[in-house]
Image (cartoon, helix red, strand yellow):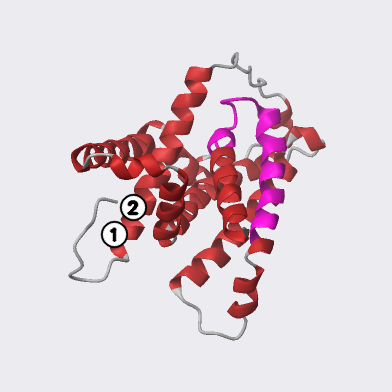
Amino acid sequence: MICSIRFVLDVILFVLLLTLFKRHVISADYHVWAGLVYCGLLIWHIWLNRQWLQQLIGRKKKGLDWLVLGLILVWILLLVTGILTAKQFGIEWHFLKPYHKFLGAISLLLVAAHIGFHWQYLKDHILQCCGFLRKVPAALATLALVGTLCLGGYGFVDSGYAKWISAPFTVAARPAADAAQRRPHKPRPFSWERLGKSMAEIAGMMFLGAYVVKCARKPPGKKSGKG
């Protein structure tokens, strides 16, 4: 039962991340409040895996250990910078926004790597929930794999990822007076098409990163399977 709860929570976290990653795809308010919900669910996720944390103390750290610790640190910094830059809390420290974007870009890579480390676990649970996928012809599965990897590559180019990860180095901090006089962002009407495109791009980017990690971790000489 605990494994099924973990998997359902993993799916919820994944879908929620896809909807909130781009700040204005739904709305800035949604980005802030959904981000807080996401952090709350992350705490639950960590609590369900508390045995791993207990075992971590005193043992020699492995690649996955450092990855998870780094991801936890990045999400803590994302939470702090998100609160300090959100107008919903009346703080709006604009000089932190480039760093918030940078941390978001880093978190995407770390989440993708985390998925790559748990590839087999996720694959087994997905096939358990969606047994019909086992009947998909190998040629069609390969075509879907290639298409998703291409979508991920396209996402890194089209989504503005380069701007996010370079933000601290390319965006000059503006004086408080200038920040107050900035033209406010005019939200666009909600569009399911825009949301779907954004979710597909982010999902493709994470899949690409996870697949690279999964292939890199494969023992030398082991033949590749379907996925």
* Residue range (magenta): 18-46
- What residue is shown at x 62% (from left), y 81% (from top)? 57
Q: Secondary structure at mark 1?
A: helix
Q: Amino acid at mark 1?
A: Cys
> Which mark, residue 215?
1
Q: Main secondary structure of the magenta part?
A: helix
Would residue 175 be visible to someone looking at this image?
no
Residue beneath the point at 25% across and 51% down: 226
Q: Is residue 143 above or below residue 127?
A: above
User: 160 or 139: which is nearer to us?
Assistant: 139
Q: Amino acid at mark 2?
A: Tyr
In the image, is residue 136 part of the stretch drawn in magenta?
Answer: no
Residue 4 visible (yes or no): yes
What whole-number distance in Å separates the C-alpha atoms at marks 2 and 1? Answer: 6 Å
Percent x, y of residue 9: 61, 49
Circle 2 packing at 10 Å, graded few (<14), some (14-19), many (20+), is many
The residue that label 2 is drawn on is: 211
